[in-house]
Image (cartoon, rainbow, N blue to C red):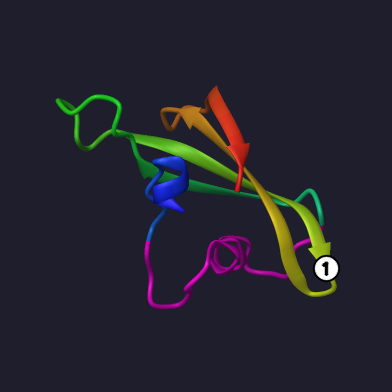
Amino acid sequence: MEDLTGIALPDHEDYDTVAGLVLQVLGRMPAAGAAADVPVPDRSDPDQPERQQLAVLTVEHMEGLRIDRLSLRLLDGIDGSADGGGHA
């Protein structure tokens, strides 16, 4: 995912995929439209390595119990002002 977007999503031993991350954050099987807010490192300013942004992963389409499509929107800073977005 980071290779495609430049956004480093958190790694954890409990999941191997972005869909697994969404499931862990939500704590339930999502429906289309469900969104998971995930803090990610903000790499826009190398002088402030501890700064974070908020990545919003929204379930766009489910195929049965499988998350088929997600969108990714990056908010500027943890306060939540919009910065940009894309599809994952």
- The part of the image, by quadrant, that contains residue 68 is bottom right
Residue at the image point whose x is 85% and y is 73% from the top: 64
**Side of 87 where 77 appears, left or right:** left
Image coordinates for residue 74, horizontal then vertical, percent? 51, 34
Q: Is residue 82 magenta?
A: no
- 4 relative position to 12: left or right: right
Q: Residue 2's spot in the image, x, y percent?
A: 40, 50
Answer above or below: position of 65 versus 69: below
Q: Residue drawn at (18%, 28%), measured in percent from left and top?
A: 46
Circle 1: residue type: Glu
Which stretch appears magenta?
11-31
Give the camera-side residue of 28 and 15. Answer: 15
Residue 80 at what x, y percent from top left? 52, 28
Which residue in the structure is indicated by mark 1? 63
Furthest residue to the left?
Answer: 47
State left or right for residue 76 relative to residue 63. left
Of all residues, the one furthest to the right in this rendering is: 64
Q: 38 or 11, which lies in front?
A: 11
Q: Residue furthest front?
A: 4
Residue drawn at (38%, 70%) of the image? 12
Q: Locate residue 81, reporting x and y percent.
A: 53, 22
Q: Secondary structure at mark 1?
A: strand
